[in-house]
Structure formats: structure tokens, C-alpha cells
Amino acid sequence: MAGELRFDPLTREWVNVVGARQHRPNLPTTGCPFCPGGLEAPEHYDTRWFPNRWPAYEPGAPIDLAAAEAAGVEVLPAVGRAEVILYSPVHDGSLGSLGVGQIRKVVDLWAERTAALLAVDEVAYVLAFESRGTEVGATIHHPHGQIYAFPFIPPSPLREARVSAEHGCGVCAELGHEHDDERRIVARNDEWTAWVPFASGYPYGLRLAPTRHVGGLADLDDVEREALAAVLFDVLGRYDRLWSGDERRSEIFPYLMWFHQAPAASHCGRLDDYHLHVHLAPPQRAPGLARFIASGEVGSGTLSNPVVPEDAAETLRQA
């Protein structure tokens, strides 16, 4: 089942080819494997994690990507981990409907798994994420997310860190700018802020970040974890209420969510270049209308957002 990392000489980036995932199941027709008593949760639980049966990355010996590139190696094993995170034993609902108390338990589990995976020799980076809704490929509706542990720092967070190394922390600068402007802020407490980015590439996309310059989920203190749970409950609830009453709206509001955080210290020159933050990207631009990323965007690497960020923020504030 193991995938393989293939080196793309044009971009000098590694692509994970995982043929076994082509055979993973679609929406179950009988029963839910994530409900208590199901295949992946034989006992009752509050929150739960387990290894993905169709992993994108699997345990193996540490690999040196830099040495492999220097030696002209084109294929490497996809070493790492792939885990599923169950948010609640309750089948119906979403992360945003669970309440602050239950979301806090999920935050603690994210932090626990981040710390545990970063302590594994072959793991360089941990990405916690969620794909919600059939529009983004979710195959089971039970509230859950995933974690990938990579043997390298992926291009997206690495690019952000390089910008911070050259220009100063981009998240800190953005927080300061948004606090001064306030037009794009959707939710805020003393420890966390949620806003529509000034240059958002996604309609109704949001960014969440802690006020303190902190590297990762495991570094959050008790107050910051509670505040993150409160902000997630707020903004995900706004997504669930967005366009409510419109018959064209999806029954389950879809979104993509991912956390960018600091890598393992052994794989990073400057941990201070990383400021924990959350990206939220719904794939819709209006009720029932998908926001397709077109050829001109993929081909150029430049997103074109049809919804003005300030308008999106106001709509979300009203939700």
C-alpha cells in the first residue's frame, strides 16, 4: 500500500503517488465506521485517533531528501504517518456544531498528536486538516479530520517561512494590520483573531491566528487552546448559517481547513519563522455555485477571487 515520492525536475518538488488510495471506499451504504461500535471505533469514545487504512504516508526509515536530490534520486518511499481524528461519537453535525467544550477536546488531541508525531525520527512536518462535504471529496459525513506527517517540510508552509525569514513574520504583520483596519475581522477574542485575508484567493476564505507568536498547536497554553475552540465554534457556525434558507445551498456546508505550524526542530534552521495559523477555504462563491479553480489560475499559480474580501467579511459577520 505504500506510496512513493517522485521528484519533479521542473519544480524541484516531491509529488506523492499513492495508487492504493484509488481503491478506498466511498460513502458507506450501511452503518458508519466512525460511530461507536463501527469498524474504526469498536468502543465508546469522546475523541479518538487511529491510523488511516489507506495512508498517504507510512512508517519507515528516515530519508534525506537533500542528499537524494544531490545524488539524482527520482523515487523515494513515502515515509511518514497518516491518521484520522474523530471529533465526537455523535454522527450528525460538524466540528462547528459540537460546542466549545468538545472542540477544546479536539484541539487538545490535535496538539497531542502533533507533539507525538514530531518526535518520530522520520517526521519533519505535521499537517492537521479537514475536508468537509462531498464537494471537496469527503467520503464519510461523521465529524472528523486527518493528520499527515511528512518526511519533509511541504512547499506551502516552507514558502511562508521563507517570506518571514526575509521580511519578518507575515502573520504578526497581518494581525497588526487587520486589528488597525477591522473591516475584514469576523471574530475575535483576547487570544485569537479570525479574518478574511486582504488578498484572499478564496471566496469567504478565512485565516485564524493567535495573538502571541507561537509555533505550533502543542505550544498553545490552556487559555489559548480554549480561545481557539471558541473562535472555531464561532466561525464554523457562521459557515453553517451562511445562505441559510436558500434552497440552492448545500445541506452540509463544505470547506477545506488546514493548520500551518512549525516543523520538527531537527528539520528546521529557524523555528521562529513559523507562526501557527489556520486556513479555511470554502469551495463555493454563492449558494449552490461552486468556485472552480480554472486553468488560468492553476497554470499561472495566481488565484482570482470573484468575491471582494471586505464584502465576504461583512456577509460572514451578518451570518
Image (tube, grey):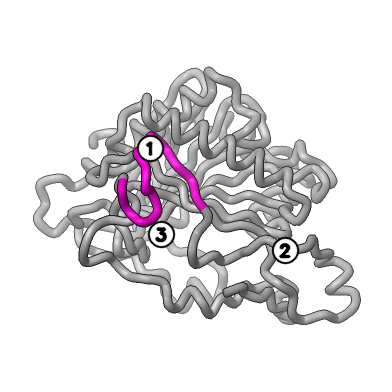
**Pointer 3 or 1: first along the chain:** 1
Q: Give the residue type that dot 1 points to.
A: Tyr
Q: Secondary structure at mark 2?
A: loop
Front position among marks 3 and 2: 2
Which percent across, then down, holds residue 199? Answer: 50, 50
- How packed mark 1 is, by other alpha carbons closer than 10 Å (few <14, some 14-19, many 20 or more), is some
Judging by the rendered image, the residue that carries numbered circle 2 is 60
- Secondary structure mostly seen in magenta is loop
Report the residue at 47% width, 52% height from top. 84
Query: From the viewer's perspective, is 82 left or right of 100?
Result: right
Give whichever of 25, 302 is nearer the camera.
25
Query: From the viewer's perspective, is 34 left or right of 3?
Result: left
Which percent across, then down, holds residue 303? Answer: 48, 64
Report the residue at 84% width, 46% height from top. 269
Residue 40 lies in the magenta-colored region: yes
- The stretch in magenta equals 37-50
Give whichever of 101, 273 is nearer the camera.
101
230, above or below 284, in the image: above
Would residue 158 be visible to someone looking at this image? yes
Q: Give the residue type that dot 2 points to.
A: Gly
- How packed mark 2 is, by other alpha carbons closer than 10 Å (few <14, some 14-19, many 20 or more), is some
Which percent across, then down, holds residue 64? Answer: 84, 64
Judging by the rendered image, the residue that carries numbered circle 3 is 305
